[in-house]
Image (tube, helix red, strand yellow):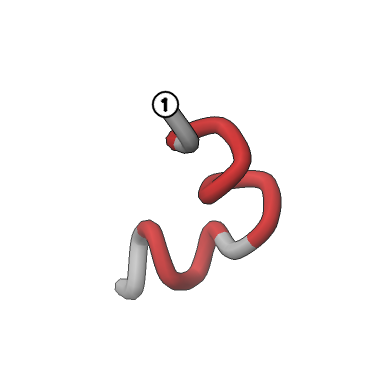
């Protein structure tokens, strides 16, 4: 349940486009 944190902390790592 760390999706929000992942997006806020490192959105680049979550969505490396």
| 13 on left or right of 5 | left
Q: Position of residue 15 (x, y in %)?
A: 35, 60
Q: Residue furthest top?
A: 1
Q: Which residue is mark 1?
A: 1
| Labels in figure, total | 1
Q: Position of residue 1 (x, y in %)?
A: 41, 26
Q: Position of residue 6 (x, y in %)?
A: 53, 49
**What residue lies at 61% left-to-right and 41% top-to-bottom?**
5
**Mark 1 surroundings within 10 Å by alpha-carbon count, few (fewer than 14), some (14 through 19), many (20 or more):** few
Indicate the quadrant where residue 3 lies: top left
Compared to residue 13, the image places residue 5 above or below, namely above
Q: Quadrant of the C terminus?
A: bottom left
**What residue lies at 34% left-to-right and 73% top-to-bottom?**
16
Compared to residue 5, the image places residue 16 above or below, namely below
| 17 on left or right of 9 | left
Q: Quick one: 15 or 1, which is closer to the camera?
A: 1
């Amino acid at each position: 349940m760390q999706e929000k944190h992942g997006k806020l902390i490192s959105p680049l790592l979550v969505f490396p486009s």
